[in-house]
Image (cartoon, helix red, strand yellow):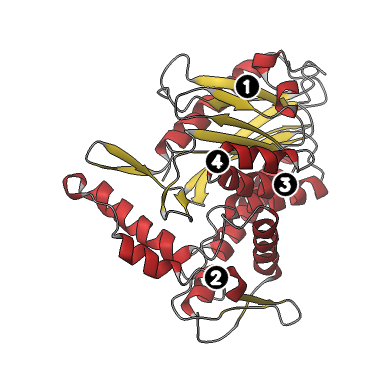
């Protein structure tokens, strides 16, 4: 689904391996593996453990966790014995659907952060996003006939996006979309939210040092136990450079116990004529937002970072920078349409370009 992101992860892994060559210590060794059966993207796991068997146990736990959350948060497919987001959508305007706690928690999380950040990132925006998804897929399949969705069609769909009509009954563990035609789209948060849940499960099981790259949503755990580095390094891609360019990296961030998520116009898109049409839709215009080429968020929680990467992309810089200022422990990088870069004040302390290193 995100070919550029997948290539980025591969290169990220190469950088990680180069940085760790010859650094294994007696107590911990570095292991890595990947899978491609969840969230339509490549998942990479890197960890320092005492034995390969220990790593394999963590890897199995992580993979099984992602498989579970993939099914729960899927909006396209049904699964035997599982009431998921698609089940909720299929019953819009019909009846409440009893779901697992992880779905209840995700929806409450998204509603809460929607309220905190001004309402532009809305999981009830599904009717509009589905139209864009269908036109994007048609444009990819048949580029010569690619076109924009009609505004009247988008405007009509927008009438079915009231998040207050997403009714959550915590006591009964049910979710009800009050109007027929409503639908949830949790693409702005589900992968990051699932990543955070998986990380917490792995940490409870004993994992002390590692990185999970969930389709480019990077979550670090502890510090690298290579007896050399004190912080992980994660590259930020320059959206204006080819992934194959030697100077493809815009910058690098040094972190421990943090999530790094980027949203950009180069990740999912199609062309209408010569114009690139990306997937991040501004609810104010119902068209792709044009404030930035990319934004990168650093936050302690992967679900928060994922959600905020869309929030920040959909707001002009004055407003999005204020959102970041008001949030403790959250930092951002903005790549403007002209290629210039703006960063939050706290981000300067962890960016390579401002002198940060992998030492404290």
User: Would you say residue 219 is visible in this rendering?
Assistant: no
Query: At which x and y percent is residue 147?
Result: 24, 51
Query: At which x and y percent is residue 55?
Result: 71, 38
Q: Earlier in the sequence, mark 4 or mark 3?
A: 3
Q: Earlier in the sequence, mark 4 or mark 2?
A: 2
Quick one: label 3, few (<14), some, or many (20+) residues within 10 Å? many
> From mark 4 to mark 3, how far is it between C-alphas?
32 Å
Quick one: label 1, few (<14), some, or many (20+) residues within 10 Å? some
Label 3–label 2 contact, CB within 8 A: no
Determine which residue is flagged by label 4.
316
User: Would you say residue 276 is visible in this rendering?
Assistant: yes
> From mark 4 to mark 2, how far is it between C-alphas?
23 Å
Q: Earlier in the sequence, mark 4 or mark 1?
A: 1
Looking at the picture, does residue 232 appear above or below residue 207? above
In the structure shown, which secondary structural element does the residue marked by tag 3 occupy? helix
Determine which residue is flagged by label 3.
199
Between 78 and 92, which is closer to the camera in this rendering?
92
> From mark 1 to mark 2, how far is it between C-alphas?
39 Å
Query: At which x and y percent is residue 153?
Result: 32, 66
Query: Mark on residue 252?
Result: 1
Q: Quadrant of residue 27?
A: top right
Query: Mark on residue 162?
Result: 2
Label 4–label 2 contact, CB within 8 A: no
At 57% across and 26% down in the image, what residue appears? Answer: 236
Between 249 and 208, which is closer to the camera in this rendering?
249
Q: Earlier in the sequence, mark 3 or mark 2?
A: 2
């Amino acid at each position: 689904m995100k070919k550029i992101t997948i290539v980025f992860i591969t290169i990220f892994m190469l950088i990680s391996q180069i940085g760790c060559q010859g650094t294994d210590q007696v107590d911990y060794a570095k292991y890595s593996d990947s899978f491609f059966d969840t969230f339509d993207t490549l998942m990479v796991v890197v960890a320092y453990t005492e034995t390969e068997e220990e790593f394999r146990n963590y890897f199995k736990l992580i993979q099984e966790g992602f498989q579970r959350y993939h099914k729960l948060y899927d909006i396209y497919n049904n699964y035997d014995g599982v009431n998921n987001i698609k089940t909720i959508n299929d019953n819009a305007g019909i009846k409440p659907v009893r779901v697992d706690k992880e779905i209840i928690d995700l929806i409450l999380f998204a509603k809460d952060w929607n309220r905190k950040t001004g309402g532009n990132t809305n999981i009830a925006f599904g009717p509009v996003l589905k139209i864009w998804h269908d036109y994007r897929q048609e444009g990819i399949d048949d580029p010569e006939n690619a076109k924009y969705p009609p505004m009247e069609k988008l405007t009509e769909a927008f009438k079915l996006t009231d998040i207050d009509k997403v009714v959550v009954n915590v006591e009964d563990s049910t979710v009800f979309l009050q109007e027929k035609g409503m639908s949830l789209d949790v693409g702005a948060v589900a992968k990051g939210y699932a990543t955070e849940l998986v990380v917490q499960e792995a940490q409870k099981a004993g994992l002390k040092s590692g990185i999970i790259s969930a389709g480019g949503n990077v979550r670090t755990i502890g510090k690298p136990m290579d007896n050399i580095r004190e912080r992980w390094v994660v590259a930020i891609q320059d959206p204006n450079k080819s992934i194959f360019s030697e100077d493809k990296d815009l910058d690098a961030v040094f972190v421990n116990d943090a999530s790094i998520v980027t949203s950009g116009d180069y990740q999912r898109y199609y062309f209408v004529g010569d114009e690139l049409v990306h997937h991040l839709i501004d609810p104010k215009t119902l068209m792709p937002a044009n404030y930035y080429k990319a934004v990168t968020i650093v936050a302690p929680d992967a679900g928060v970072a994922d959600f905020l990467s869309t929030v920040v992309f959909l707001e002009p810089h004055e407003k999005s920078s204020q959102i970041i200022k008001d949030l403790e422990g959250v930092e951002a990088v903005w790549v403007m349409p002209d290629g210039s870069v703006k960063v939050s004040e706290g981000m300067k302390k962890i960016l390579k370009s401002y002198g940060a290193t992998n030492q404290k």
